[in-house]
Image: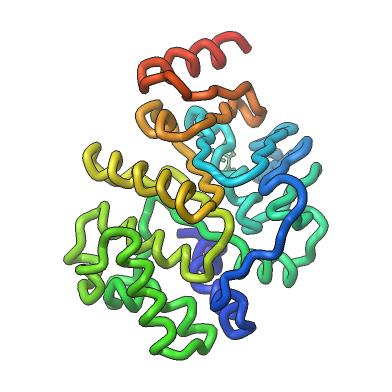
């Protein structure tokens, strides 16, 4: 876990103190949930710059389950970091839930991240000495929320995610799939509108993976969330309604999955990547 990813997990707290999650009322937002325009991002390596994103455009109008697909090194994680307000673009615009992330200062980005964003990674990033309940509640604890309020919320979330019986277990007593569900419950503590998942099943077997994709799809549908998942696997992406294909730091096209199976997605993906 990078330092910023630690902050993303632990830092969600202060909002609870401000009462940001208890009502979980979302102000009506006009415009798209996610919109990126001509986004560039490079990393300095010694005296040269690696261009990770080279003019990315992306628009997601509302709730639903969406994928970003691309080969290793195509810029998927970099894009997720920008959407999660963990980093800023060098150039271009990033709007999430109507907020202009590219115009925010550090303090505003941190506040945004706490209030609006849930994120999970391939590594579950749970604290090994804490139970499932305590892991979910930790960001609220750090914010000084009342224990009873947090316990009610974590009970609700662990139940929603199908691990309601596992709340008193520590991570090493949970399967990989259960650990990722606990990590998702933690990401949902403050009822964000957007959940980002960067290769969330990268450490899971195929049966646990399919269960997790079904769960993300039902969160998008039942909680009216925008769930955006990064993957390089057609079997994962086929569970989403739309796939954005990233190649060498640019959007390379979109795949609508309706009527396609995983093999169909794989073949559309190959066509898109080959055509460019
Ligand atoms: P993906 O998630 O699709 O595998 P990344 O967004 O992680 O791709 O990386 C895109 C490109 O940026 C790659 O060439 C990668 O080596 C480079 N990169 C990513 N993070 C850093 C970093 N912190 N420092 C230097 N280069 C980086
Ligand atoms: Mg990545």
- 261 up-or-down from 179: above or below: above
- 31 up-or-down from 140: above or below: above
Residue 50 visible here? no
Q: Is residue 113 left or right of residue 241?
A: right
Q: Quick one: 251 or 210, which is closer to the camera?
A: 210
Q: Position of residue 68 (x, y in %)?
A: 53, 35
Q: Position of residue 111 (x, y in %)?
A: 68, 71
- 181 up-or-down from 89: above or below: below
Ligand 1: image quarter: top right
Q: Is residue 96 left or right of residue 14?
A: right
User: From the image, which quarter does the N terminus lie in?
Assistant: bottom left
Point 25% across, 54% down: residue: 176
Q: Is residue 185 left or right of residue 210?
A: right
Q: Is residue 59 left or right of residue 14?
A: right
Point 20% across, 62% down: residue: 174
Q: Position of residue 11 (x, y in %)?
A: 55, 73
On the image, which quarter does residue 254 sit in? top right
On the image, which quarter does residue 175 sit in? bottom left
Q: Quick one: 27 or 237, which is closer to the camera?
A: 27
User: From the image, which quarter does the C terminus lie in?
Assistant: top right
Q: Position of residue 106 (x, y in %)?
A: 73, 67
- 185 up-or-down from 101: above or below: below
Point 62% across, 63% down: residue: 116
Point 62% across, 43% down: residue: 79
Residue 259 visible here? yes
């Amino acid at each position: 876990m990078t330092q910023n990813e630690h902050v993303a997990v632990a830092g969600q707290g202060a909002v609870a103190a401000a009462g940001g999650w208890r009502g979980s009322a979302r102000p009506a937002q006009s415009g798209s949930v996610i919109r990126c325009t001509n986004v560039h991002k490079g990393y300095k390596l010694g005296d040269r710059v690696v261009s990770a994103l080279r003019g990315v455009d992306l628009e997601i109008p509302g709730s639903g389950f969406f994928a970003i697909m691309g080969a290793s090194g195509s810029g998927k994680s970099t894009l997720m970091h920008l959407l999660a307000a963990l980093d800023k673009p060098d150039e271009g615009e990033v709007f999430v839930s109507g907020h202009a992330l590219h115009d925010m200062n550090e303090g505003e980005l941190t506040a945004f991240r706490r209030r609006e964003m849930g994120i999970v990674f391939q590594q579950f990033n749970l604290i090994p000495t804490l139970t499932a309940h305590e892991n979910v509640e930790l960001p609220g604890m750090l914010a000084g929320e009342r224990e009873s309020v947090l316990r009610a919320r974590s009970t609700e979330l662990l139940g929603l995610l199908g691990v309601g019986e596992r709340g008193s277990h520590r991570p090493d007593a949970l399967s990989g799939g259960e650990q990722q569900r606990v990590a998702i419950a933690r990401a949902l503590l403050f009822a964000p509108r957007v959940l980002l998942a960067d290769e969330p099943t990268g450490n899971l077997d195929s049966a646990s993976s399919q269960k997790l994709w079904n769960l993300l799809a039902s969160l998008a549908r039942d909680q009216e969330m925008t769930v955006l998942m990064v993957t390089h696997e057609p079997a994962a992406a086929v569970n989403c309604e739309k796939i954005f294909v990233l190649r060498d730091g640019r959007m390379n096209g979109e795949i609508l999955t309706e009527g396609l199976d995983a093999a169909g997605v794989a073949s559309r993906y190959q066509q898109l990547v080959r055509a460019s």
